Image (spheres, coloured by chain):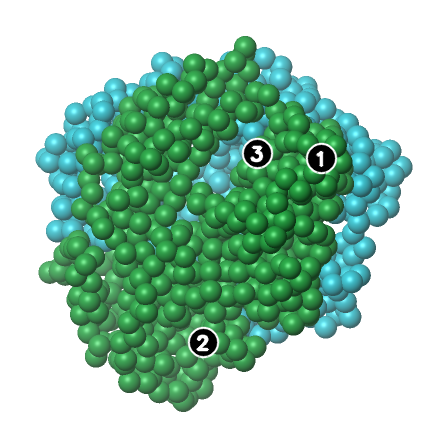
Amino acid sequence: MITKEQKELARWAMQYALKKGCQQCRVGIYSGSETSFEVRDTQLDKLQQATENQMVIYLFVDGRYGSISTNRMERRELEKFISDGITSVRFLAEDPARKLPDPSLYFSGSEASLALYDPNFGSISADEKLKLAKAAAAEIYGQDSRLISVSSGYGDNESFAYIIASNGFEGESATSSFGVSVSASVKADGDARPESYWYDETLTWADLQKQGVGKKALERALRKIGQKKIQSGKFQMLVENTAVRTIISPIISAINGSSIQQKNSFLLDKIGQKVVSEKMTLIDNPLMPKALGAKCFDREGIATKKRNVFENGVLKTYYIDSYIANKLNVAPTTGSPSLLYFDNGSYSQQELIGKMTKGIFVTGFNGGNCNSSTGNFSYGIEGFLVENGELKQPVSEMNITGNMLGMWSNLAEIGNDALKSSSWQLPSLLFDAVDFSGL
Amino acid sequence: MLAGAALIPGAAILESFSPKALTLQWVLDHFKVTESDLRKIMAIALENGGDYADIFFEHTLDNMLVLRDGKVNSTSSNIDFGVGIRVIKGDQTGYAYTENVTLLDMIKAARTAAKIANGMAGVKASVIKEYTLKKNYYSVISSWEETGVKLKKPFLEKINDRIFSLDKRVSRVIVSQTDTTSYILFFNSDGVMMHDYRPMGTLGATCIMEQNGQIENGRSARSFRMGAEFLTDDLVETISQETVKQTALMFEAIKPKGGEMPVVMGAGGSGILLHEAIGHAFEADFNRKNTSIFSDKLGKKVCDSSISVLDDGTIPFNRGAVNMDDEGVLGQKTYIIKDGILNSYLHDRISAKHYGVAPTGNGRRQSFRFTPIPRMRATYMENGSAHEEDLIASVKNGIYVDNFTNGQVQIGAGDFTFFVKSGRLIENGKLSHPIKDINIIGNGPKALADITMVANNYKMDNGTWTCGKDGQSCPVTCGMPSVLVSKLTVGGE
């Protein structure tokens, strides 16, 4: 938890900055601790423990702006750091858009209702944690002659934040997370050693998957044996829930206020327009209790709320923090997404595969990028060739290439398998007519 | 609980200094430790029977300055300070770090790290010897700590003005300048005591252009381990010209038709091929764990005998240079491939011990919060004898690529990719239409074996390359002469 002393230090730093010439100031104190165990085959490979702290101070000086951060909490050092920071800021050009948010937007209340912190965090013993990491690897170690190497890991962390702003905001948050992961390497044809992994991540120890993670990792690695590339062509593409983040990230970047303000976005001036398939209703709900990524206020203290990002293919919002809002002369929303999900998924992954006549079930992306101005993209992929609803052949070393708006306009079906172990709870998605290049 | 937050009454203040005065005593004083403290901590680290232990102190200062919408209007600074204590038993690692360098906090961290071993103390720490760096690959004329916003700001403004003056289609420019200064003190159970002062400067610009309703963006940046003398008018001109040229080219460029084809990789940034296709796969941790596609290839021929590939920490002022790595091994030059034969993996201390060889100075870490692991430095291929024109002339239908944004590799399967920001089609042995925004994918061992021609125009790419592995970022560089790869899979429609 954030201690009384830390809160006092934050208030002192804010007062000091105001005294030294800031007209407005925001101070955040972040602290946390983490433990991790890594196991290779049957043996503990690495253990790590740490606690850490950081103070971030946002300085608004004579219409100018800068920020400073440090993990040194000694007052005399902070005094020098703050004074030097203010001196630096004074050399900058004025920027009237830089000011604290309107206090009416601030969150007031308690984030405790979201239950993001496991009260049992401190009571789970190191032995129990190590046992879990070892058990995850032991599930598969020695179970298959093709298995070359197993690595498993257990990690947890607790993180606390306390933010105050000179125009009246005070907010506090506490989150915990627990994770277990296994990666498996298997022998394939020639020198190839395909690898895959599986993991679970939760906010509470009780919810963490304690069995089956290793088995799933091995199963995912074994099914890659025999990967090859196939003839280039335009096919259906089913993207597995674990991989969808790669292709939705460019859409989220394109509706980021900074990209919009810089006119560097393929979704510029598109609010209220149907820009992608009507199947796409994407929701951001930061207020979902007991969920990764949930929060009551953003890093500026602005209260979060549920909003539709796309509604039946129509773009509904940009992510606009108070700086960009002042620049664009619009109302702020919030600076970034918290907890994204699709509204209307109705098919299991197996049912989606069943709907494919010829296509590729993409289980992972390998590199690639998207042009933020135009939406043109190209990504490496691996997965499986699907014909008439059946997996026929593992594939790899191929690319998909196209335009984001074109691809998302071809969104055909949405899975009901939203990934709960991530803050973006994305499901498997089926697209029509994607360009694959291989042989 | 919150060990790191302690508000120590009377703890002395950190002060900046001029790097010319850097002595071991100064660094010890800077971190408020004595040799006697270090010996105490070391004894505790080894009390459960660890084979080896090390203590890594770091104090890093980062500054960033941004120009946006025509004005230098935001700045940020960060201080990171702490010590990491590592204990090794066989291949196993115990690690803990603390942000407070009081003896009490360091002893607590040493006890945590010591838990990796569970026996009696065996190894005793050797007598402390100060090892001085053989060479300083990044001596500084003007330290960043003595260089305020006032001095840096004009360079950002000049880039902005120059970019707008070069092309009427420019609508937006963002310029950013960052600098980092790190003080490192290292001590290990072999008695090695070393210190390093690591500067880094970067300057980069992004511009947006509009033409008939179409928007395009382009970027250029440079990074060196240098002090503030890094900022020059020549650099301003280079970055401005490149940014504009890169962006303007995008309006003409097309996507090629995809599929397998020969690819001529232009000198410089094409070194990303080495980094992704073979560099990572040669990092010894993957091989020690038997998970690299090159795990059984040491001493074997992996490509044409005209090819030699190095990973080098000794290039003066290079972003990937290391006077010493992050586990007290001197910076050095390592042939990964010598005359077509896999010559050496890239080792940290753990993998070197595992393989019974000397560490290669590749044990690097993002900060004291992380354990060192094998990482690349500056990775490049030596010159061949062909001319670039001959490479291009030998291709009937293919592409020429010379500008990249990012890459990735799957260590075990060997599939690697890199994203091509721009290049050209090759038609009947001649460069033709510009191309853009395509991914190229290949398989490491195959691609290496498919390098059929190497030109004599080696170039280092001094952009802001940052390599990510196991959640840690490290500054690196890459370079290459132009090469012909006879077959890679090119994205396209």
Q: Chain of mark 3?
A: B
Task: Say which quadrant the N terminus of chain B sits in.
Answer: bottom left
Q: Chain of mark 2?
A: B
Instruction: Give the colour in which the image draws chain A.
Output: cyan
Q: Which mark is residue B421?
A: 3
Q: Which residue is mark 1?
A: B429
Circle 1: residue type: Gly
Q: Quick one: B309 or A47, which is closer to the camera? A: B309
Side of B426 where B239 appears, left or right: left
Outermost residue toward the right?
A388
Q: Quick one: B131 or A132, which is closer to the camera? A: B131
Side of B230 where B420 appears, left or right: right
Q: Position of residue A122 (x, y in %)?
A: 41, 61
Q: Which mark is residue B88?
A: 2
Task: Chain letter for green, please.
Answer: B
Residue that appears at 78% across and 70% down: A145
